[in-house]
């Protein structure tokens, strides 16, 4: 199964993607997460550092695919999730779609693309061109991350339009929306009533979700550290590697990297949301081909809601 995660920039796609990847791995699946962003930070909370990109590796090898080995581009992450960062072209030049294509091509050359039960593409920002939509060419399902706000739902509607367009020529379906860090869902419900699609889950407005990102850990790892501190400290090889890359980041940003035991049960509670999403995906749902709203319809729908509040 191949999944493509989309959503408005800054909405929490990478945090959501990493936790879903672990949830799927906990269900016994072999998972590969591919970051599709020039920032190459999609898998940061899985590996604990910014891994080299496929484009940088190809460039260093003068694009000789035969000189590249799986261990050059595939890095092990927390929970047994393997990680790849596609990277991107220089700012203002090139196309993100080309980079995704080169990434898939290399993984196929390495006989790795079909070795996984689940491949999850974590894709940057909104869909504004065919390049950003390239991961949909390889996906069985699209997942849209949103919140209960105007801008995120406007982006979600554009992504839904892209799914509908790609579904004309590919066996692609929209698995559903995920509401991320929101205390309400009334606007989400209003949108999906007008543009029918499943809502996989709505994650509560809990600060630990954001904090996990800057700590360079998934919520599953934070929960595990709090529950079994001695056991996790004994895993020194991985911890030392991760801490080596994290120390400067935490010092620079003045972030307290010490676990807070009071948050253990809260982390477990949130992890169950991601496990629920994983369980829904593993049923291979029928999904939908969405019928997006026109810009005018969407503005009217969302504006009327805000004006009545």
Image (cartoon, grey):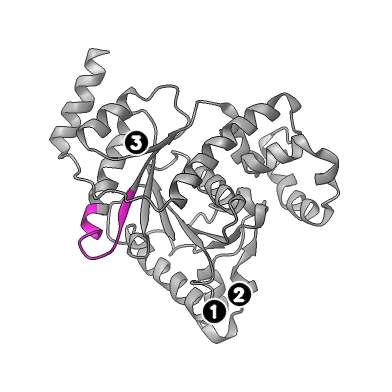
Q: Is 199 on the left or on the right of 109, as rendered?
A: left
| Nearest the eye: 215 or 137 | 137
Magenta stretch, residue numbers = 164-174
Q: Which residue is mark 3?
A: 152
Q: Residues within 10 Å of mark 2 (few under 14, many from 20)?
A: few
For the residues labelled 1 and 2, the Cα–Cα distance comes to 6 Å
Is residue 281 among the parts visible in the rendering?
Answer: yes
| Numbered disc in front, either 2 or 3 | 2
Q: Residues within 10 Å of mark 1 (few under 14, many from 20)?
A: some
Image quadrant in which you'd find residue 194? top left
Q: Which residue is mark 2?
A: 70
Q: Which residue is mark 1?
A: 110
Q: Residue at x 59, y 85 (%)?
A: 67
Residue furthest to the top: 309
Asked if the residue at tag 3 contacts the one at tag 1, i.e. Cβ–Cβ closer than 8 Å, the answer is no
Where is residue 239? Give x, y as percent. 78, 51
Q: Residue at x 31, y 49 (%)?
A: 287
Give the secondary structure at mark 3: helix
Image quadrant in which you'd find residue 227? top right
Asked if the residue at tag 2 contacts the one at tag 1, i.e. Cβ–Cβ closer than 8 Å, the answer is yes
Give the secondary structure at mark 2: helix
């Amino acid at each position: 199964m191949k999944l493509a995660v989309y959503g408005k920039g800054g909405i929490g796609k990478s945090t959501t993607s990493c936790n879903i990847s672990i949830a799927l791995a906990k269900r016994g699946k072999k998972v590969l997460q591919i970051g599709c962003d020039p920032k190459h930070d999609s898998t940061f909370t899985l590996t604990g550092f910014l891994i080299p990109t496929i484009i940088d590796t190809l460039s260093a090898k003068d694009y000789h695919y035969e000189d590249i080995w799986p261990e050059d581009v595939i890095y092990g992450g927390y929970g047994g999730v393997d990680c790849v960062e596609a990277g991107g072209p220089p700012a203002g030049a090139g196309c993100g779609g080309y980079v995704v294509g080169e990434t898939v091509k290399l993984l196929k050359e390495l006989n790795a693309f079909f070795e996984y039960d689940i491949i999850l593409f974590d894709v940057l920002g909104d869909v504004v061109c065919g390049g950003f939509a390239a991961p949909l060419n390889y996906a069985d399902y699209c997942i849209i991350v949103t919140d209960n706000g105007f801008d995120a739902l406007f982006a979600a509607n554009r992504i839904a339009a892209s799914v509908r367009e790609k579904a004309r020529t590919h066996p692609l379906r929209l698995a559903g929306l995920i509401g991320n860090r929101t205390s309400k869902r009334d606007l989400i419900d209003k949108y999906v009533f007008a543009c029918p699609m499943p809502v996989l889950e709505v994650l509560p407005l809990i600060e630990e979700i954001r904090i996990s990102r800057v700590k360079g850990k998934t919520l599953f790892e934070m929960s595990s550290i709090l529950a079994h501190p001695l056991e996790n400290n004994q895993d020194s090889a991985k911890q030392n590697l991760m801490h080596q890359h994290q120390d400067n980041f935490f010092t620079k940003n003045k972030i307290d990297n010490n676990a807070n035991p009071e948050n253990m049960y809260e982390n477990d509670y949130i992890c169950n949301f991601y496990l629920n999403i994983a369980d829904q995906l593993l049923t291979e749902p029928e999904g939908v081909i969405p019928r997006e709203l026109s810009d005018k319809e969407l503005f009217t729908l969302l504006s009327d809601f805000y004006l009545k509040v």
